[in-house]
Image (cartoon, rainbow, N blue to C red):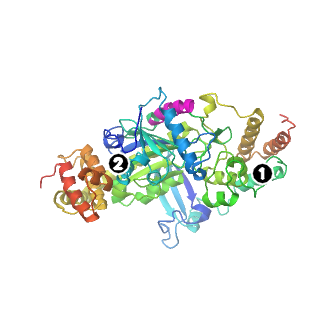
């Protein structure tokens, strides 16, 4: 049997609608759920506070973040400012006229082009929602033959996907190399690998 | 394929998938549903569409759906041609969302005669494909959905990119656009107060737990919908197996607590609760929709656990549907004030269940 500990968002409570107290000390609000796993299936769970969880030795305080959107942002930081074809952050989407403020307040995109226009805001959002930033799964291209994306865009997307994978897998040397490849590819110099 | 005209009544459908009370794990899993979010190239997404574009888009989709060769025979119901009451009937049958029912511009739904397929047109996305099957059948439902999606992709130029997959209006649906959900009846977990624990565990593994009518709705009558939250970065078969395994685990958990509720001293309390619910259904003269759902849930539990022998699950499911305000008013063929509705509901439920006190 294995044990798995999960924390509420930002170390806060587990569920905003249900206040639960720690089952160990009965005093502090529970912020961690410990699940017992047998052959991958959850066979039991216990809600505890951070202090009790630490005492029980199931969690360490302040674990270094394995992967965060910020880390990826930092890595991608060098890419910002060298995308002359991308619209500025404050500009409305050329496809539908949606403004960045509108996108942020509604949380909805206005057209397919918004995915590029609001890329800067969108990527961390996708990471937060899905813990991923690129698609794995069916595409119409493999079903019918619609107009394919230009070859160049596809290789850029592939490089970005590999970069994300490398960062997530904490293979930072590979990530740095991929970042340089991506930078070169975006300048139209072609990747070297 | 036929197209509803203005003023037409929506066609009378046979009982939908969730009413049958059949399929794998049917004692707990009522119905499995797949939903795909799709948008067309060349049109802005719904939040930015103006009236004329919405009409143009609606016309385009309906005309392409009429091309032969779709795996399912679909009839289009033009929502502008039906009134609020008929729209609420469609919501109660899970064929359209409450959001679509509230739209005031060109929109519609294409439904097959078995109510196992319903395509919503002009909802939050241009097209919302829904496929239903009774019981826990995630794999079968995904296979049918994929076949239908393939046929739709041949007819309609979908918006997509290599990087983000299918492009949707809300980033929560980006990628596969697939939301696979199973409607579960969990009286055991609710009665033994384990439901919050089950909900928390489900949320930790990125599953959403919602009420009977989806987002924001309450879990009336111990009915819950469990679905995947992540649509990006996992492919369709991974999503299918995630939901299947997690729901299987919840089903097993529900069975265990049901067993505990029927053992030792708990048994009498459980039987008392079921028989009290039956007593209310047999005798009450006024029943709110909430109270009715609670009683029907207890009755369903009693039948599934073979504690009550004179009732059928299919009748309980039919009663669940007919006790909803839209169906009740359509059945009685008149608009009713809430108090009149509660009286008619008590009467109708006795008829449907064949209760003779």
- The reply to whether discs 2 and 1 touch (Cβ–Cβ < 8 Å) is no
Residue at image position (32%, 39%) is: B13
- The residue singled out by tag 2 in the image is B255
Position of A77 with respect to A115 (left or right) is right
Q: Main secondary structure of the magenta part?
A: helix
Q: Considering only vertical position in the picture, is B146 above or below B318? A: above
Magenta span covers which residues? B141-155
Tell me whether marks 2 and 1 sit on the same chain: no
Q: CA distance from mark 2 to mark 1?
A: 56 Å
**Which one is nearer the viewer's eye here, A186 or B306?**
A186
* Quadrant location, the N terminus of chain B: top left
- Chain of residue at mark 1: A
How far across and how far down the image is residue A40, in percent? Answer: 51, 44
Secondary structure under badge 2?
A: helix
Which of the 4 image quadrants contains residue B14? top left
Residue at image position (49%, 28%) is: B67
Secondary structure under badge 1?
A: loop
Farthest residue, direction top: B69
How far across and how far down the image is residue A91, in percent? Answer: 75, 56
User: Which mark, residue A87?
Assistant: 1
Nearer to us: label 2 or label 1: 1
How far across and how far down the image is residue A74, in percent? Answer: 78, 54
Farthest residue, direction bottom: A27
Residue B346 sits inside the magenta stretch:
no
**Which one is nearer the viewer's eye here, B34 or A130?**
B34
């Amino acid at each position: 049997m294995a044990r798995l500990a999960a924390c509420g968002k930002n170390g806060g409570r587990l569920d905003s609608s249900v206040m639960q107290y720690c089952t160990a000390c009965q005093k502090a609000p529970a912020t961690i759920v410990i699940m017992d796993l047998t052959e991958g299936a959850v066979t039991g769970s216990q809600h505890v506070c951070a202090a009790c969880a630490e005492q029980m030795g199931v969690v360490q305080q302040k674990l270094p973040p394995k992967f965060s959107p910020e880390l990826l942002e930092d890595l991608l930081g060098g890419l910002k400012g060298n995308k002359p074809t991308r619209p500025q952050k404050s500009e409305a989407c050329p496809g539908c006229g949606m403004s960045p403020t509108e996108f942020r307040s509604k949380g909805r995109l206005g057209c397919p082009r918004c995915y590029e226009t609001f890329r800067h805001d969108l990527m961390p959002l996708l990471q937060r929602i899905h813990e991923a930033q690129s698609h794995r799964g069916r595409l119409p291209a493999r079903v019918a033959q619609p107009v394919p994306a230009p070859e160049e865009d596809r290789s850029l997307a592939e490089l970005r996907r590999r970069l994300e994978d490398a960062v997530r897998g904490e293979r930072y040397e590979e990530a740095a190399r991929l970042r340089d490849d991506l930078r070169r590819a975006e300048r139209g110099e072609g990747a070297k690998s | 394929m036929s197209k509803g005209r203005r003023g037409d009544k929506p066609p009378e459908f046979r009982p939908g998938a969730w009413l049958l009370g059949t399929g794998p794990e049917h004692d707990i899993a009522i119905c499995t549903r797949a939903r795909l979010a799709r948008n067309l190239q060349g049109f802005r997404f719904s939040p930015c569409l103006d009236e004329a574009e919405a009409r143009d888009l609606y016309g385009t989709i309906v005309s392409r759906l009429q091309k032969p060769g779709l795996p399912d025979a679909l009839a289009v119901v033009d929502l502008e041609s039906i009134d609020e009451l008929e729209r609420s009937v469609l919501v109660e049958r899970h064929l359209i969302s409450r959001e679509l029912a509230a739209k005031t511009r060109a929109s519609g739904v294409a439904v097959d005669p078995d109510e196992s397929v319903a395509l919503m047109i002009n909802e939050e996305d241009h097209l919302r494909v829904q496929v239903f099957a009774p019981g826990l059948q995630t794999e079968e439902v995904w296979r049918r959905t994929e076949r239908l999606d393939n046929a739709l992709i041949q007819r309609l130029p979908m918006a997509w990119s290599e990087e983000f997959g299918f492009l949707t209006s809300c980033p929560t649906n980006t990628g596969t656009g697939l939301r696979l959900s199973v409607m579960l009846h969990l009286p055991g977990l609710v009665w033994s107060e384990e439901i919050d624990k089950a909900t928390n565990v489900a949320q930790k593994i990125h599953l959403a737990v919602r009420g009977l009518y989806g987002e924001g709705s309450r879990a009336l009558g111990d009915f819950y919908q469990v679905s995947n939250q992540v649509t990006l970065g996992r492919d369709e078969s991974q999503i299918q197996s995630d939901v299947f395994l997690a729901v299987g685990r919840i089903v097993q958990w529900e069975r265990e607590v049901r067993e505990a509720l029927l053992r030792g001293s708990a048994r009498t309390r459980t039987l008392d609760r079921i028989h009290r619910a039956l007593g209310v259904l047999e005798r009450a003269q006024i029943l709110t929709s909430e109270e009715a759902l609670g009683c029907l849930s207890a009755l369903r539990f009693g039948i599934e656990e073979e504690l009550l022998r004179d009732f059928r699950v299919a009748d309980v499911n039919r009663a669940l549907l007919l006790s909803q305000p839209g169906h009740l008013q359509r059945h009685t063929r008149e608009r009713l004030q809430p108090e009149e509705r509660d009286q008619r509901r008590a009467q109708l439920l006795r008829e449907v269940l064949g209760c003779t006190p």
